[in-house]
Image (cartoon, rainbow, N blue to C red):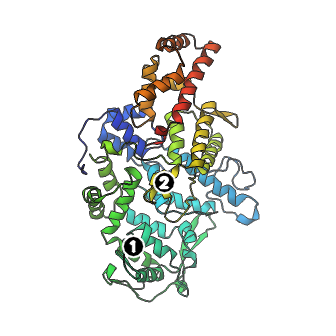
Amino acid sequence: MSTLNPYTGNWDSKRASFLLGRTIYGKTKAEIEETVSLGLEQTLDKLFEESETPAPPIHHKFEDDPDAPIGTTWVDKYYPLNDIQGLRNARRNSVIIWQTGLLQENKFSLLEKMVLFWHEHFPVNDINLGEVSYEYLSTIRAHALGNFRTLTEKMTLSPAMLIFLNGNQNNKESPNENYARELLELFTIGRGEAVGDGDYTNYTETDIVEIAKALTGWKARISETGFAEAYFLNFRHDTTNKQLSARFDNVVIPNEGEEEYKKVIEIILAKREVARHICRQLHIWFVGANIDDDVEMNIINPMADIMYVNDYDIKKPLRALLASEYFHSEVHRGCMLSSPLDFLYKSINTFEIKMPEDIISKYYIWEAIAQAGALLEMVIMNVPSVAGWKAYYQAPGYYQFWINSVTLGFREEVANALIVGNEIRGFRLGIDALEFISKIDNASDPNLLIKNIADLIFEFPLSQNQSDYLKEVLIPGLPDFEWTVEYGKYLENPEDLALKISVYTKVATLLATMMKMPEYYLM
């Protein structure tokens, strides 16, 4: 059994590749080499560095917003949304495209992985207001590597969450328990096993009722400055004392008005089980879904101790995990099926597909990526349930939910489209096969070419049968030297069109085949 002790073993390209595969969206050969050169600790320093606040979303094709023409942001522009047909959807879609693009733009950073982690942890869907969606994602980004206490407070008053889990309707005459229930069951402490009627290991149904009362009085709106915000109405707030159960030491929550929600979170987070619950979710996201008794004792508990004694700092337990001998154990390699967005950006970034320079063209391409994500059943701002995506909570399948008879076909279509190249507003979005292999070591040797590509895009070495099969794809029925000679001639005469097409076709067919192998979907 590995422990949370720091990893001190050999640091090589295989381990560097694994770390990047779990922490960024699409590692490149150059980034792996940089990671090997930096070493584990300096790589983690870089991954955890603070990122600049990104520019806000823009309109890229909606032309009827009077205050925000094409290419400019609408974020600080108030306008009665119902007065202009299509404006509401345009702003909402703009946010989804913007966040999809940030997964690629913020490249060598852990931040975007954590933004998506918290989006899955505090999920929302059907928020058809761009202003609300932007506030929600911006809040997550600002605190994704900060403090869980602060993030939970912010999420409790996020207009998106007030809308999604009915906080808007939560008032003293008719308390709505939706958010209080999910705050306990999913977002903080977890339910635990049922031990009686309405009584669970970590809280009771009475606690849900009383906490719902404590959270009354909040509403969401879009201000005249164009930003989504929460506001408090004291006359809607339950001012009585709220009596919690023995699960929370029979504490009484007195009336504290608009500060009362902070008291609720303080009481919940006083329980160490909250830290354990969050650390289990981090484990599922970054390591794997297999959490047995040994993992609970030797990994989850020490991580939770780090988080708890540091007042719910997010970075410290996560860094301890990513630096540990446990994380770098061979048993975790390839134990996850890649999420749709991991798959898409692996296919784009690892193969170093070029992106256009101008922001409008980028938005059109990010829109196409978001649409592909929808076909693969992963859409930003549309998490399917309050529990998140099934891949991160539904035992025993977990990540296997990403692959089914429909999505497998779409993954193969993505591979085909990127090999052939897809025209988007005159820009070719596709893999330049010859440019890609020019960066692969020993590309003139067919065996080493295949091995080195496999080392970059697969988690496991190829078997001899797989290597032989792929070589047959590259040079069917021909001896090795035929590839060496042909590729060498191409390098000497890159303007020879017939030679270029011949070499390109061989390499493109090889890459397409490798991208459709089951191993390509593993992380």
Q: Does 494 sit above or below residue 135?
A: above
Q: Does 488 sit above or below residue 56?
A: above
From the viewer's side, name the closer residue of 24 and 81: 24
- Side (left or right) of 224 relative to 300: right
Disc count in the image? 2
- Side (left or right) of 423 relative to 3: right
From the viewer's side, name the closer residue of 86 and 288: 288
> Alpha-carbon distance for marks 1 and 2?
23 Å
Q: Which residue is mark 1?
A: 265
Q: Amino acid at mark 1?
A: Ile
Label 1 SS: helix
**Counting other residues with Cα less than 10 Å from the Cα at mark 1, is it few (<14), some (14-19), or many (20 or more)?**
some
**Counting other residues with Cα less than 10 Å from the Cα at mark 2, is it few (<14), some (14-19), or many (20 or more)?**
many
From the viewer's side, name the closer residue of 424 and 481: 481
Instruction: Name the front one of labels 1 and 2.
Output: 2
Q: Earlier in the sequence, mark 1 or mark 2?
A: 2
- Side (left or right) of 364 relative to 261: right
Residue 204 locus on image (x, y percent): 39, 80
Residue 353 locus on image (x, y percent): 56, 33
Residue 140 locus on image (x, y percent): 48, 59
Residue 104 can be seen, yes or no: no
Q: Does 479 sit above or below residue 264?
A: above
Residue drawn at x 43%, y 41% as measured from the top left: 108
Q: Does 82 sit above or below residue 21?
A: below
Residue drawn at x 39%, y 69% as measured from the top left: 190
Quarter-of-image position of residue 490 = top right
Residue 377 — which label? none
Q: Which residue is mark 2?
A: 116
